Image (cartoon, rainbow, N blue to C red):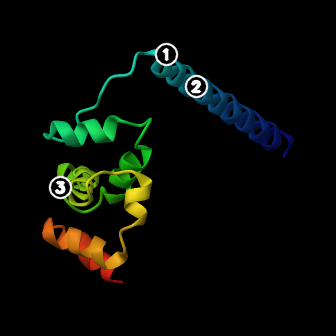
């Protein structure tokens, strides 16, 4: 009984040590990445769409929307959604987005062949 108890404690301590090592490695890798100069990421084959998605200073919501939309369709098509919306409404500022009602947004989705997402918006 005592041997099992000690083995249990030793196993638990080993798991804690392993978890701490993993956390430290992840922190170290994260710090290395943050120290690197920023590089634009190519999300799509559309330079203007990529420019919008990479502009985290002015349009972080474009990146977030693309992440949320990245479901059950070809990834590149999902990542074009913020750009297509911006073209339809003349920009991607929050103030511009707030002026669009749900019916207008559904129309944008319909006109841009985003049928899967359009049907999700219906509900």
The residue at 38%/61% (across/down) is 97
User: Which quarter of the rendered picture does the C terminus lie within?
Assistant: bottom left
> Residue 71, position in %: x, y?
29, 60
Mark 2 / mark 1, whichever is N-terminal: 2
Q: Nearer the viewer, residue 78 or 14?
A: 78
- Residue under pointer 2: 27
> Residue 79, position in %: x, y?
25, 50
* 88 left or right of 33 in image: left
How far separated are the C-alphas under marks 2 and 3? 32 Å
> Residue 16, position in %: x, y?
70, 34
Q: Is residue 43 visible?
A: no
Give SS at disc 1: helix
Crowd class of label 1 (few under 14; some 14 to 19; many from 20; radius 10 Å): few
Mark 1 / mark 3, whichever is N-terminal: 1
Crowd class of label 3 (few under 14; some 14 to 19; many from 20; radius 10 Å): few
Is residue 35 shown above or below 100?
above
Residue occupying the far bottom of the picture: 123
- Residue under pointer 3: 74
Q: Quadrant of residue 70?
A: bottom left
Mark 2 / mark 3, whichever is N-terminal: 2
Q: Quadrant of residue 4?
A: top right
Residue 100: assigned label: none
The residue at 13%/39% (across/down) is 45
Give SS at disc 3: loop
Q: Nearer the viewer, residue 50 or 29?
A: 50
* 111 left or right of 38 in image: left
> Residue 9, position in %: x, y?
79, 38
- Residue under pointer 1: 35
């Amino acid at each position: 009984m005592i041997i099992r108890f000690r083995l249990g404690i030793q196993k638990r301590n080993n798991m804690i040590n392993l978890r701490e090592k993993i956390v430290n490695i992840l922190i170290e890798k994260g710090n290395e990445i943050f120290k690197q100069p920023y590089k634009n990421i190519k999300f799509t084959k559309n330079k203007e769409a990529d420019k919008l998605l990479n502009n985290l200073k002015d349009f972080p919501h474009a990146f977030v929307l693309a992440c949320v939309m990245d479901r059950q369709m070809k990834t590149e098509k999902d990542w074009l959604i913020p750009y297509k919306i911006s073209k339809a409404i003349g920009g991607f500022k929050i103030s511009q987005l707030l002026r669009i009602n749900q019916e207008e947004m559904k129309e944008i989705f319909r006109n841009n062949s985003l049928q899967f997402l359009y049907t999700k918006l219906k509900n």
